[in-house]
Amino acid sequence: MLDISELSRESGVPASKLRYYEEVGLIRSIGRKGLRRVFEPDVLPRLALIALGQAAGFSLVEIREMLGQEKEPSIDRNMLAAKADAVDRHIKELSALRDGLRHAATCTAPSHLECPTFQRLMRIALTRQGMRKKVRPTR
Amino acid sequence: MLDISELSRESGVPASKLRYYEEVGLIRSIGRKGLRRVFEPDVLPRLALIALGQAAGFSLVEIREMLGQEKEPSIDRNMLAAKADAVDRHIKELSALRDGLRHAATCTAPSHLECPTFQRLMRIALTRQGMRKKVRPTR
DNA sequence: ACTTGACTTCAAGTTGACTTGAAGTAGTAG
DNA sequence: CTACTACTTCAAGTCAACTTGAAGTCAAGT
């Protein structure tokens, strides 16, 4: 059992962020000691997953969906697989970007427009589209 | 030569965004026809690169640095290579996330904490840290 | 019992990346 | 020449994801 400062120290996540995450339903405290929140240690891996999900470009709402917002042990496996596929597509795009950057660092062609590497990069870029959702406090 | 609505139609980027991008120095118009901006067609690939850079999680300021803010043909090659390496590290993280998601979709172990796949995921997640910069209009 | 200080809530502020709206202007069709 | 419409500027608004600040509470040490 951890209080918020212990959790903050262990995870490196500021207390204000932890309170915010609880407010929007990303993590849960199991009770109070007086006023103070009491957390179970298993929020630590959960926080790691949240950080990773953010690094992957997911919104907090999407992450909440992926992790399961409540004490549900059975999360939707199809949805997880779909998310994995989405991340995989993202990786493909980033690979194109990386290659494009490396190419730009070495290519001395007069016009990038004529370069096949650059053209491939652009084709992939143009298939992109973004969608975002809104995060609202749970209750 | 394109006016803003043509550029918007060709690129799929709303005109308001194009004006904003010009304001912060991501793209340039080469002049005016009356009030109206006139763009060169080569902003199209540039817009594609901007979108790709965003997909990669870079801020507009970072993207401006990568692409070169002005009509400089010689952008810093070492910096580009460094950015490519940064993207590559990001890809590694995302690969871990993807694998983690796939694993979570199939693993039925009672506690994820005991699972080596999950532990690897977490190790990578914990090495993350983020930094952001501010975007200000040029001039 | 009293002080201390880390916790609490709640509202408001911040940042990046845009969008929206009002008010004005200018090239083109009739 | 007059209208129309698509452009223009500029200020303000929005949204996600937090942070900050004020004012209050409470457990623990002296």
Image: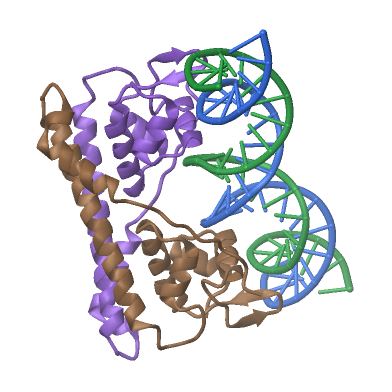
Chain colours: A purple, B brown, C blue, D green
Q: Determine the residue positioned at 51% across, 71% down.
A: B26
Q: How many marks?
A: 0
- Where in the figure is residue A19, as x and y percent of width and height? 48, 29
Q: Determine the residue positioned at 44% across, 42% down.
A: A132
Q: Is residue A77 above or below residue A55?
A: above
> Considering depth in this image, is B40 or A19 the residue closer to the camera?
A19
- Where in the figure is residue D8, as x and y percent of width and height? 70, 69
Q: State which quadrant residue D11 falls in.
A: bottom right
In the rendered view of the protein, which quadrant contains the C terminus of chain B? bottom right
> Considering depth in this image, is B8 or B67 the residue closer to the camera?
B67
Q: State which quadrant residue B73 falls in.
A: bottom left
- Where in the figure is residue B69, as x and y percent of width and height? 50, 78
- For this view, does A90 lie left or right of residue A139? left
- For this view, does B128 lie left or right of residue B19? left
- Where in the figure is residue B88, as x and y percent of width and height? 24, 63
Q: Is residue A88 above or below residue B53?
A: above
Q: Determine the residue positioned at 43% across, 28% down.
A: A4
Q: State which quadrant residue A128 falls in.
A: bottom left
- For this view, does C27 lie left or right of residue A26? right
Q: Is residue D18 above or below residue B51?
A: above
> Considering depth in this image, is B80 or D30 the residue closer to the camera?
D30
> Considering depth in this image, is A48 or B62 the residue closer to the camera?
A48
